[in-house]
Image: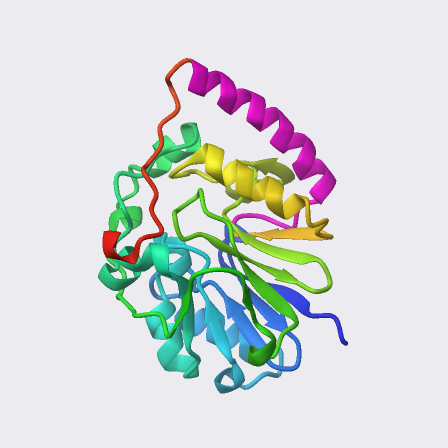
């Protein structure tokens, strides 16, 4: 079995927003960037010597516009089906994220003022509806989709058999990647405690690296140390009644 290769495709800045290309027996793309990123991702795939029409699947990690914004466009450009979790059907079908955003700190409060985050993307209907752990073997990579709710109700990650975790927004580099290698929260979480539980569940599987939506790959040991401190911080906020949480549901009728 050959190891699945994980290649970052920056769609904004050096690594402020990333999509990913997974190379195994066939290529798979994870995330579709902001609206209008489809040609950039397609061209990045082509520069690797891969015919974009050979892409077997586009996996969307969650229903935020910087991750699903070009899903419909990239589907047209490659012909590949799109996979997304059933609990994030509402943003996928409407092209709008669930609002209000719930900032995790000053960066999120600042970004919440950016009208681009409140724009409408082209809607899409997932061809592959994820409900639980899902093998990607039939799509050409030795990897599994892992439900990791918390950032949004339908957040998912992709864990390769070689130990690479494409983690979406489970965790990020500090300040949207401006401080590379330093674990931090992304700007928003719907349920910080549930997200942290999902992160710890993934760390318990002993990944070799965490490839994130914002920044460079993170070292699991460093993320684990950060997660322990973050748990103490969240516990203190919860005890003081200051932890904002959006009610999450995996019921498709709630979408």
**Image coords of residue 125 (percent x, y):** 30, 70
Eyeballing the image, is 101 above or below 16? above
Location of the C terminus (image quadrant): bottom left
Eyeballing the image, is 105 above or below 79? above
Does residue 114 appear to the left or right of 164 in the view shown? left
Q: Residue furthest top?
A: 240
Along the line of sight, the residue nearer the viewer: 167 or 40: 167
Q: How many marks?
A: 0
Q: Is residue 67 magenta?
A: no
Image: magenta residue range: 214-239
Q: Could you tell me which residue is drawn at 27 percent across and 61 percent down?
A: 121
**Image coords of residue 67 (percent x, y):** 42, 57
Q: Could you tell me which residue is drawn at 49 percent across and 16 percent down?
A: 236
Location of the N terminus (image quadrant): bottom right
**Image coords of residue 40 (percent x, y):** 46, 70
- Report whether residue 182 is seen: yes
**Image coords of residue 118 (percent x, y):** 26, 47
Q: Could you tell me which residue is drawn at 52 percent across and 52 percent down?
A: 213
């Amino acid at each position: 079995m050959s190891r699945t290769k994980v290649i970052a495709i920056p769609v904004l800045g050096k690594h402020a927003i990333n999509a990913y290309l997974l190379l195994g027996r066939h290529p798979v793309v994870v995330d579709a960037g902001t609206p209008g990123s489809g040609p950039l991702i397609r061209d990045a795939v082509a520069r690797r010597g891969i015919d974009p029409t050979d892409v077997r699947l586009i996996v969307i990690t969650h229903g935020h516009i910087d991750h699903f914004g070009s899903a419909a466009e990239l589907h047209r450009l490659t012909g590949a089906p799109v996979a997304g979790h059933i609990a994030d059907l509402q943003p996928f079908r409407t092209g709008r994220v669930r609002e209000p955003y719930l900032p995790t700190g000053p960066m999120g409060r600042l970004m919440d003022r950016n009208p681009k985050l409140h724009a409408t993307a082209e809607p899409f209907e997932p061809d592959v509806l994820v409900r639980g752990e899902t093998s990607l073997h039939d799509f050409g990579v030795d990897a599994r989709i892992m439900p990791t709710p918390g950032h949004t109700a339908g957040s998912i990650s992709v864990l390769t058999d070689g130990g690479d975790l494409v983690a979406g927004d489970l965790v990020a580099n500090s300040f949207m990647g401006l401080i590379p290698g330093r674990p931090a929260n992304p700007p928003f979480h719907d349920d910080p405690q549930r997200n942290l539980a999902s992160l710890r569940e993934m760390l318990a599987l002993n990944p070799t690296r965490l490839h994130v939506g914002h920044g460079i790959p993170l070292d699991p040991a460093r993320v684990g140390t950060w997660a322990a401190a973050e748990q103490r911080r969240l516990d203190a906020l919860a005890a003081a009644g200051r932890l904002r949480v959006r009610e999450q549901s995996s019921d498709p009728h709630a979408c």
